[in-house]
Amino acid sequence: MTTTAYIVGAELILATAVSVWVIYFQAPLAHEEYVSSYALRPPPRLIGRLFHFSSLVLFLVVAGADLRQTNGSCLLYYTFWNFVLQTAYWIWALIDPKRTSRARSMFLDLLLPTNMVMVVVVWAILYPLVGDDLNNWISCTQHGGNLVLLLIEFVCSDVRSVPLSTGALVGLWATTYATFAWVVHSFTNVWLYPFLDVDQPWAPLWYVTSPYISLCPSLSRGTASCRYLGLLALHIVFFGVVALLAAIKVYIAEHIPVDYDGTSKLLLPRVTPKGSQHRPTT
């Protein structure tokens, strides 16, 4: 291997080690923000159940169409990896309507930033270059429609902050895919994404700050000059965006009262682990 390959390997090992350390010693699931008074919640509303069911049906249809269109090659790409996780979330939502599993809320906090990375890169960077290649219903669902649905779920779900330790899961997910792509290259001698080529002299910088990338198999031809701000860096940035959105929800819950049945109540009363009020849920 070249010197740059060793440097990139060291970066991946370091990022993975830090993420695992944080997850182990600052376990996200142990954070009080993922604790709630589930037994006090009312039965899930029909509209919420229909929302989860219709989202799941849509995702299954899109995933099936993508698998058929690409003859299964989409399984190797980061877009489809994330889409599979999102599909799993909608299944989870149907079998856990009152969100009795702490991990479901944490899972949503993982999905949102990774999906934001997909949407921003595809439409802000790739679309001006490839144009019509993105104008199909599969791509629009995987790089936009899914984010709208996840944001609706986020807005309607528990009022809580996002623990910073959950960011380690986001970082681990990104480095796991980068490692997977390297393993694929070792067997096929082909890089799934051009920026992952560890033999390039600028590869160590790309892995952290400014890689070339195409995000789905239909765009993998002729897009090697598409730059964006970096796989790992963008995940961290958009995790911060999700944390900020959650903080805004908490502020609204704690500071903006509304009139309800002739009395003034907080719009979204927040629950602490010892509280007795329920939080809204879809």
Image (cartoon, rainbow, N blue to C red):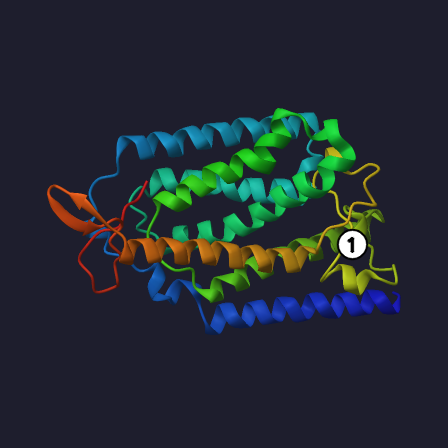
Q: What amino acid is found at the position of numbered circle 1 in the picture? A: Leu
* Residue at figure coordinates x 35%, y 43% from the top left: 156
Viewer-proximal residue among 244 and 80: 244
* Residue at figure coordinates x 29%, y 54% from the top left: 253
Establish if 178 lies above or below 11: above
Which residue extends farthest left? 262
Few, some or many C-alpha atoms within 10 Å of disc 1 (few <14, some 14-19, many ≥20)? many
- Which residue lies under the disc numbered 1? 196
| Quadrant including the N terminus | bottom right
The percent coordinates of residue 121 (x first, y second) are: 67, 45
The percent coordinates of residue 13 (x first, y second) are: 68, 68
Quick one: SS at disc 1? Answer: helix
Viewer-proximal residue among 77 and 47: 47
Viewer-proximal residue among 86 and 131: 131
Q: Is residue 175 left or right of residue 87?
A: right
Establish if 91 lies above or below 235: above
The percent coordinates of residue 282 (x first, y second) are: 32, 40
Q: Is residue 100 left or right of residue 60?
A: left
* Residue at figure coordinates x 69%, y 30% from the top left: 134
Establish if 33 lies above or below 120: below
The percent coordinates of residue 17 (x first, y second) are: 61, 71
Residue 175 shows in this picture:
no
Residue 121 shows in this picture:
yes
To which quarter of the image does residue 214 belong? Answer: top right
Total numbered labels placed on residues in the image: 1
